[in-house]
Image (cartoon, helix red, strand yellow):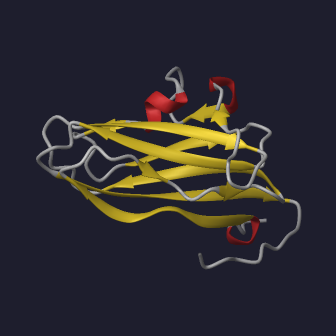
Amino acid sequence: MRDLLNNIQVKRAISPVTQTNSDTALVSQIIDRQGYDTLTFLIATGTLSDADATFAVTMDESDDSGLSGSNSVATADLISQTSGTAALTAAGFTFAGDDNVRSIGYIGGKRYVRLTITPTGNNSGSAPLCAIAVLGNPSLRPVTHATA
């Protein structure tokens, strides 16, 4: 009853990267939810060195594996880490968010989901970060773990 490991699947969303002097969006792998009822993205930051950078988080969903015809996830289909704060707002961060972990949950009905982190003002520093997708409530237990 205390076993979480065999009840979740963890997948790489955005590999650890240091975004240097760039406002280029970081786009996650497309996460396939088949066989799982829940999805939470975890975003981990390192030392964010640009003194005015902001990082907006968005999410897209689709029933197509390539996200063809995708749409932005509706606010009602997201769970915020902070009560009373919109989920995308709570998952976003600024240069002051050094060594933080943000989370955002997806409760929509689409099979495929993708996370995007878009920096603004990251012109003179670096931003180390990564994102992990945690799939839960599997239809088959124990979960067979993937390595990628």
**Who is closer to the viewer here, 63 or 129?**
63
Name of the residue lying farthest toward the top: 84
Give how far across and how far down residue 135 sits, in percent: 69, 57
Q: Is residue 121 above or below residue 32?
A: above
Lateral position of residue 135 relative to residue 27, left or right: right
Residue drawn 13% across the image and 39% down it = 51
Task: Relative to 78, say whether 100 is above or below.
Answer: below
Quarter that holds the N terminus:
bottom right
Task: State which quadrant residue 12 falls in.
Answer: bottom right
Q: Would you place residue 22 above or below residue 142 in this image?
A: above
Q: Residue at x 31, y 41 (%)?
A: 119
Q: Quadrant of residue 53?
A: top left
Query: Is 115 placed left or right of 111 in the picture?
Result: left
Q: Quadrant of residue 46?
A: bottom left
Relative image position of residue 124 (x, y in whole percent) = 11, 47
Q: Is residue 68 above or below residue 129?
A: above
Image position, residue 34 (x, y; %): 81, 58
Q: Residue furthest front?
A: 68
- The residue depicted at 69 percent of the width and 45 percent of the height is 68
| Residue 117 located left or right of residue 68 | left
Would residue 104 appear left or right of 39 to someone viewing this image? left
| Camera-nearest residue between 69 and 125 | 69
